[in-house]
Amino acid sequence: MIDNKTGQARLSTGPDRPGAECIPFYRPSGNECALFEAVYREGLPLLIKGPTGCGKTRFVMHMAARLGRPLHTVSCHDDLTAADLTGRYLLQGGETRWVDGPLTRAVREGGICYLDEVVEARKDVTVVLHPLTDDRRVLPLERTGELLQAPQSFMLVASYNPGYQNILKSLKPSTRQRFVSISFDFPPPEIEAQIIAAESGLPESQCVSLAVLAQRLRALKDVDLEEVVSTRLLIYCATLLKNGIDPYQAAEAALVEPLCDDPDVKQGLLELIHAAFG
């Protein structure tokens, strides 16, 4: 929320604060919530780095709800253009009208713009972000001639998976150094079990074995996997278990098949799962 007297960002309290049921569930594993709040208060941009399915997007959703700010999420990809972010002229009702993109809307209303997997976007897209990620905090709209000054309540958040980073897909140092950064990883088993239980509805006592299994799967060194098992997949598996699906079938459908297609690799994963489940 924004204090009307000072114009500074603050957390909602008392009757103005949304009820807990309005805030997406998120279980902190460190001091990331306090760091997000500090970054938000000071009007700084934030970059979140971490593997797929470790909770980056949920964290941003949770914090946006806690702060009472509208959230505009953009899933970045190779075809994303600067106009997709800022806006374009469109024909509406026989007239040509300017339509704001999600970044422009977030700036105008003082919301949070979240660029998910920002390294997937084209290089010219990140250039648009530069005036918003330094002390100017402005968004130039060349097509309309506007120079939008971001209000105190606006925040730019981006994320990416360093595991995919390579010479062709990486953030330029000049862009990375414009952000405060947080590194995310999968939570320890005891916390991950709580997350799985809260999200799936499966009793936490049954979720502990899934969290321990995930640790073993992620520790595999001789298995050729592009991605390790995510917390998201563990929640899917727990959801199947809650619905009475056989544990081995649930694990195969939620933890093995989504990760690989190679028969030998799948067999190795299944053997580990059978050993873990007894």
Image (cartoon, rainbow, N blue to C red):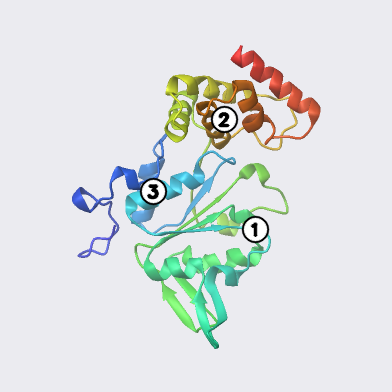
Give the labeled residue for mark 2: 237
The spot of residue 116 in percent (x, y) is 55, 53
The spot of residue 265 in percent (x, y) is 76, 27
Label 3 element class: helix
The spot of residue 129 in percent (x, y) is 53, 65
Rendering quarter of residue 240: top right
Q: Quadrant of the image for the N terminus?
A: bottom left
Foreground pick, 261 / 102: 261
Tell me the distance, in whole angstroms, between the alpha carbons under discs 2 and 3.
26 Å
Left or right? Give the position of 223 relative to 154: right
The spot of residue 217 in percent (x, y) is 64, 25
Tell me the distance, in whole angstroms, between the alpha carbons under discs 1 and 3.
24 Å
Q: Residue at x 40, y 46 (%)?
A: 62
Question: Of callouts 1 and 3, which one flags the residue occurring earlier in the amino acid sequence?
Answer: 3
Q: Is residue 136 visible?
A: no
Q: Which mark is residue 104?
A: none
Give the labeled residue for mark 3: 63
Residue sitting at the far top? 278
Foreground pick, 18 / 189: 18
* Amino acid type of the residue that numbered disc 2 sits on in the rendered structure: Cys
Give the labeled residue for mark 1: 77
For disc 2, the neighbor class at 10 Å (few under 14, some 14 to 19, many from 20) is many
